[in-house]
């Protein structure tokens, strides 16, 4: 069993930055791809970014490409999402997830473990 705990969310002005962290415990996630998803009120959960087990491959939603950077430190069993040039439309609860395989994927059903989420609010 894997437990994922996100942190780093908060309130920021448009154009600002936040860095989300997701720490895994229970067992190592170093062999698995990881993902970030977000869900705004009244909307479905959507894919934000994914990273392969090694960190060599990343995938981003078009809406965040060039502004967000996904990284991981396997020795710490932790992944990070650096969010720059934030926009009000980035406001959502952000969820970290561990995939069942090593390769990047955008499909929510290919992620077996999920964190509780951290709220990001971007004011205009």
Image (tube, grey):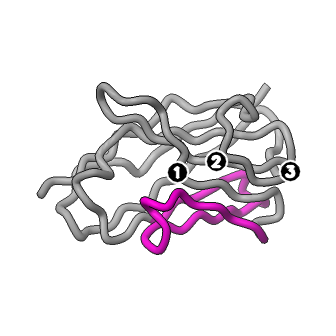
Seen at 74% across and 29% down, the residue is: 112
Seen at 65% across and 61% down, the residue is: 59
Label 3 to label 2: alpha-carbon separation: 11 Å
Seen at 73% across and 48% down, the residue is: 105
Q: Position of residue 29 (x, y in %)?
A: 80, 45
Mark 3: few/some/many CA within 10 Å (<14, 14-19, 20+): some
Q: Position of residue 92 (x, y in %)?
A: 34, 41
Mark 1: few/some/many CA within 10 Å (<14, 14-19, 20+): many
Residue range highlighted in magenta = 56-82
Q: Badges 2 and 1: C-beta atoms under 8 Å apart?
A: yes
Is 3 left, or right, of 89 in this rendering? right
Mark 2: few/some/many CA within 10 Å (<14, 14-19, 20+): many
Where the C terminus falls, by quadrant? bottom left
Which is nearer the N-term, disc 2 or disc 1? 2
Question: Mark 2: which secondary structure?
Answer: strand
Pointer 3 residue: 102
Is 12 left, or right, of 83 in this rendering? left
Give the residue at the far front of this rendering.
62
Label 2 to label 1: alpha-carbon separation: 8 Å
């Amino acid at each position: 069993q894997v437990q994922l705990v996100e942190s780093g969310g908060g309130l920021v002005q448009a154009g600002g930055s936040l860095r989300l962290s997701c720490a895994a415990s229970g067992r190592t996630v170093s062999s698995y791809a990881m993902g970030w998803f977000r869900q705004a009120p009244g909307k479905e959960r959507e894919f934000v970014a994914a990273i392969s087990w090694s960190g060599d491959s990343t995938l981003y939603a078009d809406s965040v490409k060039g502004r967000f950077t996904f990284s991981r430190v396997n020795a710490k069993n932790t992944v990070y999402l650096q969010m720059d040039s934030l926009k009000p439309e980035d406001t959502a609860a952000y969820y970290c997830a561990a995939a069942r395989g090593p390769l990047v994927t955008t499909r929510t059903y290919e992620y077996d473990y999920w964190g509780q989420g951290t709220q990001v609010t971007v004011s205009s």
